[in-house]
Image (cartoon, grey):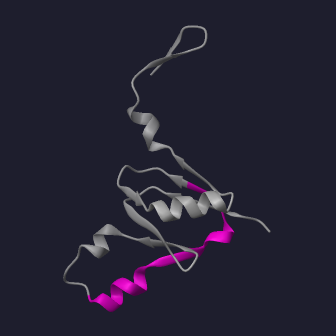
Amino acid sequence: MIKRTLYFGNPAYLSMQNQQLVLRLPEIDKNASLPLLFKKQIEASVPIEDIGMVVIDHRQITLTHDLCETLIDNNSEYTFFWFFNFLPSFSRGGGEILT
């Protein structure tokens, strides 16, 4: 079976419930004027066994430890791309300076 690659580039809450990745959006969760039923309908979920890779590309994405552990147990990968934008310059091998 082909596994899915999930890309997250906006603020989000990622957690796990019933062996599924659950996506919640902070702007929906924090909006007090929205009804609770609407907030529950907006949640998206993906079965863990369908996930091959999760790409995290925003600093305001929250992952639960349970989700990370379950992804690893399922041989899925997760990658933090945003992290590399904030590293200081460093040298690689032959003295080449990367910025």
Residue at point 24%, 73% (across, down): 30
Residue 5 occupies quadrant: bottom right
Instruction: Answer left or right for 7 relative to 61.
Output: right
Is residue 46 within the magenta segment? yes
Residue at point 38%, 33% (across, down): 86
Residue at point 39%, 59% (across, down): 62
Residue 38 occupies quadrant: bottom left
Furthest residue toward top = 95
Q: Estimate the x, y position of residue 2 in percent, counting from the top left.
A: 77, 65
Q: Is residue 44 above or below residue 5?
A: below
Q: Estimate the x, y position of residue 1 in percent, counting from the top left.
A: 80, 69
Is residue 44 within the magenta segment? yes
Nearer to us in this view, 63 or 42: 63
Nearer to us in this view, 1 or 48: 48
Residue 72 occupies quadrant: bottom right
Residue 52 shows in the view: no
Q: Is residue 93 above or below residue 1?
A: above
Write down the region rendered in magenta. Answer: 35-54
Q: Is residue 96 above or below residue 39?
A: above
Q: Quadrant of the C terminus?
A: top left
Furthest residue toward right = 1
Nearer to us in this view, 7 or 68: 68
